[in-house]
Structure formats: structure tokens, C-alpha cells
Amino acid sequence: MWNERRLRRWREAGLIDDATVARIQAWEQQQQRPWLLYAIGGLGALTVALGFLALIAANWEAIGPVAKLGADLLAGGGLAFALLRTDVRSVENGGSGRWLREVLIVLLWGWTLASIGLVSQIYNMGGETWQALLLWNVLTALLVTRGTSGFVAALGYIGVGWTVVVMMMALGKRSGHEAWVMVPAQIVSTALLFASGSRRLARVRPAFARVAGAFGWTLLLFTIAAVPNAFYARWDGQDVERYFASIAVGLGCTLALLLFAPRLIEPLVDGEVPPRAAALLRVLFGLLLSVGVASLVLPHDRLGVVAALAFIALWGLVAAFAHASDQRRLLNTATAMIGVRLFIVYAEVFGSLLRTGVGMIVSGLIVLGLVWLWVRKSLRRAPAAPTQADSQINDDTGGTP
Amino acid sequence: MIDRKLIAAALIPIAGICALIARAELRRTAGDQYLIPIAGYDPRDLLSGHYLRFRYDWEKLGVDKDDDCRWNHGDTCCICLRPGPGGDLMHPQAESTSCASARDCAAFVEGNAAWEPGRVYIPETQGDRLQNIVRDRRAAVMITPQRSGVPTVNALYIDDRPWQEAGDK
């Protein structure tokens, strides 16, 4: 739909003609995928997979263990056969029916986890939950990578992320350090961001790279929103020691992102990465690292003002980066986050209403001043765009108006 | 022509599950099965989800509760199992000793597995009934001790019979 609107605007501005519009529309039609089919089929497959799990959890004693295992293996064999047959038919029919292939991958993926649960139940196997999840991910790793849709990619990433979270929680319980609980988000988001920036992955499995980017950037934005709030807590050496593992991993991940920032932008832009966007992203990660060190490593008292300023500064950089890389949705999100935080500042009332009011007016005027300067600078730089009438005059007279 | 990677991808999960079943079956039949009395892990929370939590009641098999094995050896205090009179595995005898000594026994259970709570899966609809039965009657689990010292828990028993055969009184 937005394509149609843009095509109409370009046509009205005289940038393209009717023949070009028709060619673009025909090409777009060819590229279209049956998204609705994928979405509904994927949801149906996920529901069936979850149903398998519920059946296993019920431990239906009316069926003997041999019958249960036999039926389970039969179901698995049937799914595998159906998957292979569907793939062959899809190739023979020039790619149609690929959605069914994706659905069968999801079903086999869910079946594997349900089967591990069934065997554990029948044989009363001990062990921890993360071990079962790890086995599930290992057995289905190749299967998930055979998928080509965003839905399979999303489920695959969720499966791995879930396993990492459960592992870290078990590690935290065992070592007596709840710090490990905070580690998963940092490792997972960093890994996803690097995956999204991988050229090989983008070439071989574009949907996987795209979904990795969506998840990774979302988790990163949560981190950017959460870290400054550490200034609200009173922090001393004991806290640093208790959470040291998690802090170290987080800072390490942020440093890695800072070093490879330009690669992370590649999937977001067409063509070359704008140098300004790369620089801004580096500055953002640098500030995140600094705020992380200041709030989580250095002892401090409750510093609400610093928390607010750090939050606004970080999201200001997000907004600047979004503008430099032409990410309109991200720019809107960042602007909204800053707006919400300003309301919270108003509600927090630092010191007194008078002080808060003066502070906000001054800050607001500074922001408006910057915007005014920026607009003036942009207007001075941009050359006057030639109109259709100007083009017509040029054609007739061979000179500029 | 079928993609070879897809064939492998489809077969690996099935092969993995078959291997898991084979391993579990081997562990179950690896040695003799012993019947070990159990007690509730927490009388207020005997049942969690769809499995029964329990702790082994080694005292009923002859382990002295005032024994200082755990004090002296900590996690390396193991349980040495011997068949009862006449080779009776349904009523074995147990003794706490160092793990180094326990390895010479007919069977043994290593420290963590012996003293930490265990669990046995039960059907969703039998939770309340089994909770009462385990509390009020002689409950036990059939285990297969392993060379590693971590036993395989096979089944829940009530009054020396599989729980499925136990009546309500």
C-alpha cells in the first residue's frame, strides 16, 4: 500500500511515467509472498506443537509406555516423511507449497521437545530443565536452519533464547549469585545483532537475518531504557561484587557492539553505511558503556537526576542515529520515549516544582534552539529542487530560468 | 531430488529420541532393581506439578540417623546397598559410608543423589489421591543403581506393589 502511495506521488511529481509505474507494479506483484497463509499456517502448527506438550504433561496413564513411545515415534516418522515429500513436490511445482514445508518444520521441531518430555516422564529421568532444552536445540538445529520463513526463524531464536535463560538461572541458583540471571538478555541481544549484520546469513537465509535484527534491536532498546535506572538504587562495593559476573558480561558485550557498530547498520540501509550514522551509533554504545560503568561499577547514592539525564541523552542519541540512517519508526519511538521520560521528570519533581519548572523550560528552549539552527542549516545547504515547469523551460530554451 | 541436508535434518531428531530411549532402557536394565522406602519431601508441598517429590528414607533400611558419615564426609558420604536376607531386593539393607568404600558394595548411591530430594512422574488426575496414599501408607520407589552412583528411578510402589495396583485403603 505504501508502494502505491509513493508511486502515485512520484507520478504526480513527474519523476516517473505511466509505463514505469506499470512495470514496478508488475514486478512487486511477482515478489509477493502469501503472508497470510504463512501466518495462519504457522500459528496452527505452533498450536498443535503446544498441544503435544500438554498431552505429554498430562501423563495419560490409560496408555501404556510402550504404546505411548510407539505412537510418538510413528508421529515423528510421519512428520519427517511428510516434510521430505512436501519438499520434493515443492521443487517440482516451482516453489509452490513452501508454506506447508515451513509448517511441517515447526511441527517436527515441537514434536522433538514433546518427545524428550515423554521419554523423561516414562523413564523418570532426572536432570535439569536446561539439559532437556539444550538437547532439544541440538537435535533440531539443522532442522530449523532448513526453514526459510521469518516464522521459523523467530521460533528458532526463541527456543535458543529460552534455553540460555534457563541455563543462566540454574547457574545462578547453583553458584548462589543471582547475577547470572541478568546475563541472558545481554548475550542473546548481542548474538542476535551480530547475526543480523552477517553478510553470509543475509545471503543464505535473509529471513533469519531480518528476524535476528528485529529481536536484537528490540532487546538492545530495552537495555538502553533499563541501564540508566540503576542510578535510582544506592550502590556499594557489595552490590558490585554480587552482580560482577553479569556486569562484566554486559560491558563486554557493549564493547563488542561498539567495535563492530558499522556492520550492524548495513542491514538497515540501502547501499553504503552513512558515516554519520556509524559514528553516532559508536557514540551511543560508548555512552551506554559509560553509563553502565558509572551506574553499576562505581559506588553511588540514589541519583534520580542523573538517571533522567542519562536516559534522555541515550535516547537522544538513538533519535539522532535513527535520523542519520533514515529509520523513521525508530525516530518516532525514540522521540516518544524522550517525551514519556520528560513527563516522568515532571512527576518526579526534582527538589521543588519551581526548580523543576525552570529546568524544563530551559531544557526545552535549548532543544527548540537546536532544532531552529538545524533547520536553518538544512535550508542553506539544500539546493532548490527543479520543478516540472523549470524542466520544461530548460528543454525549450536550453538555459536556466 | 531431495536435499541431503533436509534428509539429515528430518532424521536427526528421530534418531536422537531413539537414542534417548535406548539409553534410558539400558540404564533401567543395567543391574538389579532395589525397592527403597521414601518419605515426603515437604508434607505441605508433597506434590508439585505432575510429579511427586520425595526423599529416600534410608533409616528404614538400617542407616543410623545419628551416624556421623555426612558430618565427616559431606558430599562424599554415600549409601552402600546390599540385598536383604536370601538376596531379597525388595527389602535391601543400607549403610552410610564414604564413597570410596561404597564402590566395593553390590550397589551404591552417591552423596547428592542419596540425600537430595528426588521425583517420580505421576498422572495429572492422580495427584491428590497419591498424596494421601504416600503420606499414610508404606511408599517406596524401585530404583536401578548405576555405576555412576546416580540411580534411575523406575516406579512408585505402595505397600510393595506398583501404585497402579494400590487401592485407596
Image (cartoon, coloured by chain):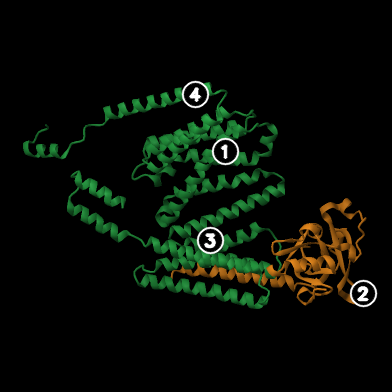
Chain letter for the part of the structure drawn in orange? B
Q: Is B160 displayed left or right of A388 in the figure?
A: right
Q: Earlier in the sequence, mark 4 or mark 1?
A: 1
Q: Tag 3: residue type? A: Ala
Q: Which element is circle 1 on?
A: helix
Q: Which residue is mark 3?
A: A141
CB atoms of marks 3 and 4 within 8 Å? no
Q: Which residue is mark 1?
A: A251
Q: Tag 2: residue type? A: Pro
Which callout, 2 or 4, points to the residue nearer the camera? 4
Q: Is A387 placed above or below A108 here?
A: above
Q: Distance of mark 2 from mark 4, alpha carbons?
A: 88 Å
Nearer-the-camera pick, B23 or B64: B64
CB atoms of marks 2 and 3 within 8 Å? no
* Subunit ID for the residue under disc 4: A
Disc 1 residue crowd, few under 14, some 14–19, many 20+, Cα 10 Å: some
* Subunit ID for the residue under disc 2: B
Looking at the rendered structure, whether the residues under marks 4 and 1 are on a common chain is answered as yes
Looking at the rendered structure, whether the residues under marks 2 and 1 are on a common chain is answered as no
Which callout, 3 or 4, points to the residue nearer the camera? 4
Image coordinates for residue A98, horizontal then vertical, percent: 40, 66
Image coordinates for residue A352, horizontal then vertical, percent: 56, 23
Q: Which residue is mark 4?
A: A357
Q: Colour of chain A?
A: green
Q: Which residue is mark 2?
A: B85
Q: Distance of mark 2 from mark 3, alpha carbons?
A: 52 Å
Nearer-the-camera pick, B101 or A203: A203
Image coordinates for residue A362, horizontal then vertical, percent: 45, 22
Looking at the rendered structure, whether the residues under marks 3 and 1 are on a common chain is answered as yes
Image quadrant in which you'd find residue A324: top left
Image quadrant in which you'd find residue A178: top right
* Subunit ID for the residue under disc 3: A
